[in-house]
Image (cartoon, rainbow, N blue to C red):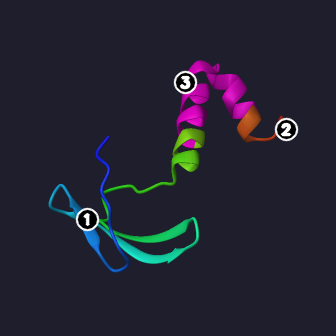
C-alpha cells in the first residue's frame, strides 16, 4: 500500500485518468472528490463487498431458486 499525505484542495492522479481531490477535513472525517471516466466504476468498499457477495451467491445458487428469490417466492 502506498501512503501519501495530502492537504485540503490537493489531489492525486491514478492511471492518468482518475483524480482524487481532498475537499474537506473535519476531525477524523475526510471528504474526497473523485473524477473518473464513466466506464470506471467507483464504489465505497463496503458496497463493493456486498456486490461481490451477491454475485458469488448468484453463481452458486440454482437458476430456478434464484428466479424464485427474485420474484419473491411467488409462482404463476
Tell which tag, 3 or 1, sits nearer the viewer: 1
Whole-percent x and y of residue 68?
Answer: 75, 32
Looking at the picture, does residue 11 appear above or below residue 16?
below
Dot placed on the residue nearer the N-terminal end, 3 or 1: 1
Q: How many marks?
A: 3
Question: Mark 2, mark 1: which one is toward the viewer?
Answer: 1
Give, as a single range, the part of the protein colored magenta.
51-68
Q: Which residue is mark 1?
A: 12
Q: Quadrant of the C terminus?
A: top right
Magenta part, dominant SS = helix
Residue 50: say if magenta: no
Query: Is the residue marked by circle 2 packed among few (<14), some (14-19), or many (20+) residues within 10 Å?
Result: few
Which residue bears the numbered disc 2? 74
Could you tell me residue 10's position as x and y percent? 29, 75
| Direction from residue 67 to residue 75 in the image, left or right | right
Question: Dot 3 lies on which element?
Answer: helix
Which is more toward the observer, 8 or 71?
8
Direction from residue 70 to residue 52 in the image, left or right: left
Q: Is residue 4 above or below residue 69?
A: below
Amino acid at each position: 500500500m502506498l501512503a501519501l499525505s495530502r492537504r485540503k484542495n490537493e489531489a492525486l492522479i491514478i492511471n492518468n485518468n482518475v483524480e482524487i481531490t481532498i475537499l474537506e477535513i473535519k476531525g477524523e472525517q475526510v471528504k474526497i472528490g473523485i473524477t473518473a471516466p464513466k466506464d470506471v466504476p467507483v464504489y465505497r468498499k463496503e458496497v463493493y463487498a456486498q456486490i461481490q457477495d451477491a454475485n458469488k451467491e448468484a453463481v452458486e445458487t440454482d437458476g430456478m431458486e434464484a428466479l424464485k428469490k427474485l420474484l419473491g417466492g411467488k409462482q404463476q
